[in-house]
Image (spheres, helix red, strand yellow):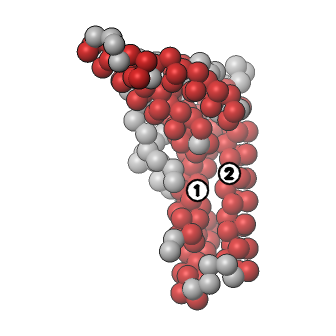
Amino acid sequence: MVETLTIPRTGPTHFERLGLPKRFALDVQEIERNYLARSRESHPDFHRMASSAEQRASLEQSAALNEAYATLREPFRRAEYLLQLQGGPTAAEHKEMTPAFLEEMLDLRMEIEDMREAGDRHAPSVVAMEHQLNKRRDNLIGDLACRFAHVESPSAAEGTRRDLLLQIRQTLNAARYIQGLLRDLRAD
C-alpha cells in the first residue's frame, strides 16, 4: 500500500543514509547491498561494549537505516518520499482523479466483491483480475520512472517540473486505488 511519509527536516535523507543517488531509478539489489553493508557497521550488537550514549546512537542509526531501506526498496514508497523531497504535492494537497478513473475503480471493486462472495480464490477470474491489476501496477511504476527521469533532468524548466510533479502525484493517487484493489482481492 502506498503510504504518506514524513520527511525529517534535519539529517541525511534516506538516499544519503544508504549511499545512493537521489533518484527514482535505483537497482533494488544495490539498495539491499548498501543497506546490508551499512547495517553491519551500525548494528547495536557490534556496540555492546560501548558507552550507553554510543549504544543509543547505534540503535538510532540502525532504526534510521531500517526506515531508509523499507522506504527505498518499494517503488511507490520511494516515489512518495522522492516527490516530497522534490517539493511536490502531498496526497492531501491534491486528491483529484478523473471521473472516468473513479468509475472504473468502482466497477473493479464491485467485480472483486462478486469474486470474493463466490469464494474460490483460485478461480480463473480471480487469477485474471490479479494479473490485470499487477500489470496495471507495473505500468504505473514505469510511468513514475519516466516522469521522475524528466523531473531529475537538469534541463527541466520550472513550469514543466511543477506539471510533472503534479502528474507524479496523480499517478501515486492511482496507485493507491490499484494497491487497495489488490489488497481486497487477496483478502481472506
> Left or right: where does residue 78 sit relative to residue 160?
left
Q: How crowded is mark 1: few (under 14 residues within 10 Å), some or many (20 or more)?
A: many
Quadrant hosting residue 43: top left
The structure residue drawn at horizontal position 51% and vertical position 24%, both measured from the top left corner, is 39
Of residue 108 and residue 104, the one placed in the foreground of this image is 108
Circle 1: element type: helix
Distance from the alpha carbon under mark 1 to that under mark 2: 8 Å
Taking 151 as reference, is 128 above or below it?
Answer: below
Q: Mark 1 points at which residue?
A: 174
Q: Mark 2 points at which residue?
A: 140
**Residue type, label 2:** Leu
Q: Are marks 1 and 2 in contact (CB under 8 Å)?
A: yes
Q: Residue 75's x, y, as percent?
A: 61, 42
**Residue type, label 1:** Ala
The structure residue drawn at horizontal position 68% and vertical position 51%, both measured from the top left corner, is 140
Q: Earlier in the sequence, mark 1 or mark 2?
A: 2
Q: Which mark is residue 139?
A: none
Of residue 100 and residue 146, the one placed in the foreground of this image is 146
Circle 2: element type: helix
